[in-house]
Amino acid sequence: MTESLADAIARAGGALPLLRNAQARPTIFPVTAEFSNWRSEQQSWRESVALLDQSHHMTDLFVSGSDALRLLRDVGVNSFASFPVDRAKQFIAVNHEGYLIGDAILFHLDDDVFDLVGHQMVIDWLQFHGETGGFDVTFERDGNSIVRAGDPKLYRYELQGPNALALMEKVTGAPVPDTKFFHMATFDLDGVVVRSLRHGMAGQPGFELFGPWSEGDRVRDALLRAGEDFDLVRVGAKAYSSANLESAWVPSPMPAIFSGRDTERYRAWLPATSAGSLAGSLASDRLEDYYVTPYDLGYGRSVAFDHDFIGRAALEELAADPPRQKVTLVWNADDVAAAQRSLLEPGLPAKYIDFPKARYGLYQVDRVLVDGRDVGISHDAGYITNEHVFASLASVESASAAPGTEVVVVWGEAPNSRKPAVEPHRQVEIRATVEPAPYSRFARESYRR
């Protein structure tokens, strides 16, 4: 019998000991790590066009039935007042206290048929409420290639960069229709029908192409042939995992499922394998200190009080004066170099800082200080070749969110946990400067254009 999350927490003596010492590895992208090198691959989505394979690392939850839209409306903070077929949106869910469960991309594929794509946190939450809430819905789940037996149901390719539009026009042999942000269109590509979502994953012009897995090789090969004229670069897992740092999307904040109203039933339903792992310098005994709200991550524009949903009352209180804002922290180059140099010096070194992405748990939560006082938490950290900076995405108090504010990121754990990615190390303080999120001016000004 599969162990439940509730049983695993009881066995470990609490949620935080379970997460701190989890043996699960950080997020794995089961595709080629580098096709050339991750620095050049990062540059491709800024300078030419990048091809990224999204077919393997995300979960698809196909939701269908007469109550599918009602379920999505009851669980999601988003407005569904106008959500016709061939649209998509960032679906966001919170618990009753208004803390974030997670987010994923929701595709409206057909009448009463939806596909929720992303990390499993919000997907699990939606499926739980659908199965236990008396909804007339049917679920078809296609896990990622780490847990799935056999091929994916769909291929999913991403084209990103200034040459993406010209490449699409060449490979389809026709002008690309003027498709709005997060709208879908259908193309004929090398004799097969391809659906496309218009968006920009790394803040650049982009198309997400998807269709039946059996046609995936044909579509990819056609893109590669046409892409020779546009300096197309295939992007591997290392560069792909860092793309969010440019668009300022936080991929895996700690889900607020370990405390709060009505979460006991959920933890009894959820397999322990979905728990995840917690990394970072924050060492609070209070679970809520690790959670974030939609406002902390810049999702306030997606919260719509035009319907009842789980957590509405809590978010209505927060909306008037959100306590935190999402920012980019640009880490001090000398301090980053000193932390890495400590591995070449006698004594206990700093925690190794991996490049291009430095996350060593699924949920990365590091302390952010101003004058020795905690003012927020730092999430994903990594190197952005296109900006020549090492940076992290963070949620900080509004009073400390102005660009140019000097802060300190505490890097490393104390005491060291037993996670596989954690070696013996000491904590260090790394100076950082608050900058806007996204950090890239192009991404800030053009992402939704």
Image (tube, helix red, strand yellow):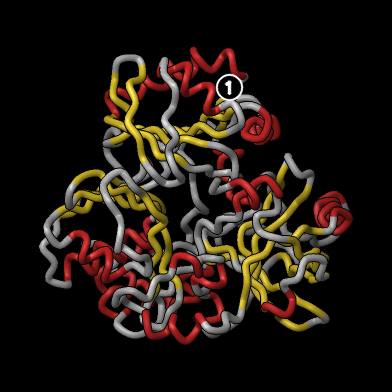
Q: Residue at x 77, y 66 (%)?
A: 403
392 vs 423, nearest the viewer? 392
Taking the image as drawn, is residue 416 in sight?
no
What is the secondary structure assignment of the residue under circle 1? strand
Q: How many numbered discs sit on the rendered protein? A: 1
Which residue position is annotated with label 1?
Answer: 232
- Give the image location of residue 372, x and y in percent: 80, 81
Category of crowding for the residue at label 1, using alpha-carbon neighbours closer than 10 angstroms: few (below 14), some (14–19), many (at least 20): many
Residue depicted at x 37% and y 76%: 305
**Amino acid type of the residue that numbered disc 1 sits on in the rendered structure:** Leu
Q: Residue 279 at what x, y percent from top left?
A: 58, 65
Residue at point 62%, 34% (across, down): 45
Q: Is residue 134 left or right of residue 372?
A: left
Quadrant where the C terminus sits is: top right
Above or below for 29 versus 254: above
Instruction: Inspect this view and state whether residue 177 appears.
Output: yes
x then y, percent, for residue 157 = 43, 32
Which quadrant of the figure contains the N terminus? Answer: bottom left
Query: Is residue 431 depicted above or below 343 in this figure?
Result: below
Residue at 70% from the left image edge and 49% from the top image edge: 440
